[in-house]
Image (cartoon, rainbow, N blue to C red):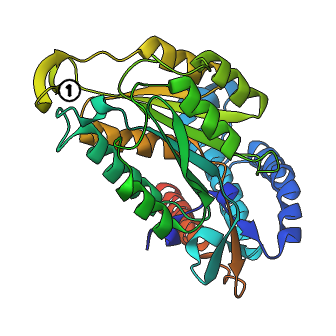
Amino acid sequence: MLNNWNIRFWEYEFFSPHWLWLMLIIPVAILLMYSLEKNRKGDIKFSRKTEDQRSIGATWILRLREGIIILYGLIAVLLIFAMAKPFHWSQYDNFDTHYKNGIDIILAMDVSLSMLTRDFEPNRLEASKEVAKEFIDERNGDRIGLVVYAGEAYTACPATLDYNVLKEQIDKINGDRIEGGTAIGTGLGTAVTRLRSDSIASKVIILLTDGSNNSGELSPEMAAELALSKNIRVYTIGVGSKGNAQSPVITPFGIQYQSMPVEIDEMTLMKIASITNGQYFRATDTESLKSIYKEIEKLEKRKMEDLHFKTEPPSNPQGFLNWAAILALLTWSLKYFTFRISE
């Protein structure tokens, strides 16, 4: 219903745009009508001087007559737009959607022991896995892969369009069979190697960690420079609440939980993001982590939708005709009730 009043002409395309050339006549017609109105003689003879006539005349009547001329011009413009047969693709749903270009994404996820900290429900690692799977479910046409790292790194799943396989691999990951520590540089470097040089233009790594780099031969800064050289944008996410949290500690009796301060090397994560033209985010709970993934999705708008319309949409001049009718009624009312001119 609202579309029947939309006259934002810049949002429309036109089946018969040649009618729009008539717009060039409108200014000339308005100037001609204004000139005739200005030189028009009165209907009543008046023998006194011109100055006396002006002293008893009403300026607002002259302005009103000029306004009516403008209204005539606006009506003509609206009618010309209507004759040009406007149509709007977004108001037409008879199409198929295909994706011409997706995004190559690698999720680089920290699985070190500290990811079992219980400031997320049930812990940081499980919450990160669930949010990552939700992010994957929202994608369409993107190749997504998974790199897992702690003190070393490995590719859990190469970039793929088979999201079911990818999510199965995410469910399986943990830090049980990987060297301890947090090698952020190694994790990032491994993710960079998983994005092929012949990959599409838009390449993204989402690096998630809850600590600071304390192992590995490749520094985070060097890994970031490597990503930059391959035109890869890196979004970094620091996972952890503020203050203290129940963190796992290895003891002779197994893993015990103690209240320990949350320490994330945010400066390094910010630097990685800055070098690669990405952005750093801090997730303090599951909801904020979900919001971060949504924000990254908004920032990466490189996917192009190819809309294959099955038929041409119908023209929709109704909005222009509706407003032309309203302005015509307004013009007639002003003339009839103000000047008592019966049309």
Classify the position of the N terminus by image quarter: bottom left
**What percent of the width, then of the height, locates residue 85?**
73, 76
Q: Can residue 88 be seen here?
A: no
**What percent of the width, then of the height, locates residue 210?**
35, 27
Q: Is residue 325 left or right of residue 40?
A: left
For residue 90, above or below residue 283: below
For residue 132, above or below residue 53: below
Q: Residue at x 75, y 47 (%)?
A: 196
The image quarter in which residue 204 lies:
top right
Q: Secondary structure at mark 1?
A: strand
For residue 283, above or below residue 137: above
Q: Residues within 10 Å of mark 1 (few under 14, many from 20)?
A: few
For residue 214, above or below residue 165: above
**What percent of the width, then of the height, locates residue 96?**
63, 80
Q: Residue at x 83, y 55 (%)?
A: 29
Q: Residue at x 27, y 47 (%)?
A: 126
**What percent of the width, then of the height, locates residue 105?**
59, 48
The image quarter in which residue 273 lies:
top right
In this figure, what is the number of numbered marks? 1
Comparing 141 with 324, the one in front is: 141
Q: Is residue 134 left or right of residue 59?
A: left
Residue lying furthest front in this view? Answer: 252
Query: Which residue type carries mark 1?
Result: Ile
Comparing 104 with 32, the one in front is: 104
Comparing 169 with 315, the one in front is: 169
Q: Can residue 35 be seen here?
A: yes
Q: Which residue is mark 1?
A: 250
Residue lying furthest bottom in this view? Answer: 311
Q: Is residue 22 left or right of residue 136?
A: right
